[in-house]
Amino acid sequence: MYNLKIISSTVRPGRKGPVIAAWIAEKAKQNGNFNVEVIDLGELNLPMMNEANHPIMRKYELDHTKKWSATIEEADAFIFVTAEYDYNYPAPLRNALEYLVHEWAYKAAGIVSYGGVSAGTRAANSLKADLITMAIVPLTQGVNFPFYAQLINDKNEFVPNETSHKAAESMLREIIRWTKGLKVVKENK
């Protein structure tokens, strides 16, 4: 079993990211290859990066950073669930990424994006570029939801179509493939 951390990136009131994160978490649990933990940045509430030392040094002084470091260190892979704000991914996710360096490295990441007509794809592409700089391997396979609000029913449940389910299954298969391969890379670092 692989430790999969699903990170929901939005923090604003009325956000829908947690509903979408719950959907992909259930898909990952059904896969049977993952220990799944959903991390909601709105609940985590990391302050703006406030460590005295650069994260590359791993000299964390603050409890919230030490806890965040331990949470990310134990992950084998990630799925980032991101909205698109102003053609990019939300600032709280960028902040959460920049708290750490080593803990992210040599792990695969899928991206589930959502938005209006663009389905959050501009945010996903921007996020991929930044993940590479952290030595995270962003996958080609992802899941994108245009006009996502239409997929949330009256019970606040996310109900995507069959194509989205297949895209999620494909992404999860690739996460497994890359996570197996990256274990070798991590052993040789």
Image (cartoon, helix red, strand yellow):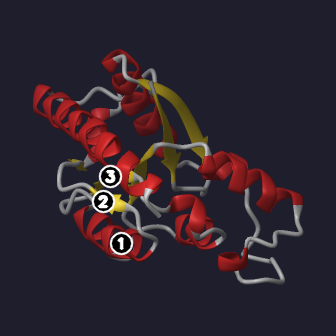
Distance from label 2 to label 1 (Cα)? 7 Å
Distance from label 3 to label 2 (Cα)? 8 Å
Residue sitting at x 69%, y 76%: 55
**Which residue position holds label 3?**
111
Task: Please provide percent x and percent y for residue 182.
Answer: 35, 50
Residue 74 in view (yes/no) = yes
Distance from label 3 to label 1 (Cα)? 13 Å
Tell me if residue 99 comes above or below residue 174 in the rendering. Answer: below
Q: Earlier in the sequence, mark 2 or mark 1?
A: 1
Q: With 5 as the anchor, is 168 left or right in this view? A: left
Nearest to the eye among marks 3 and 2: give it: 2
Q: Are marks 3 and 2 in contact (CB under 8 Å)?
A: yes
**Which residue position holds label 1?**
132
Q: Few, some or many C-alpha atoms within 10 Å of disc 3 (few <14, some 14-19, many ≥20)?
A: many
Tell me if residue 54 comes above or below residue 107 in the rendering. Answer: below
Q: Are marks 3 and 1 in contact (CB under 8 Å)?
A: no
Residue sitting at x 71%, y 83%: 54
Q: Which mark is residue 57?
A: none
Q: Nearer the viewer, residue 168 or 148?
A: 168
Tell me if residue 64 comes above or below residue 131 in the rendering. Answer: above
Q: Which mark is residue 138?
A: 2
Residue sitting at x 28%, y 60%: 120
**Amino acid type at image mark 2:** Pro
Q: Few, some or many C-alpha atoms within 10 Å of disc 2 (few <14, some 14-19, many ≥20)?
A: many
Q: Few, some or many C-alpha atoms within 10 Å of disc 1 (few <14, some 14-19, many ≥20)?
A: few
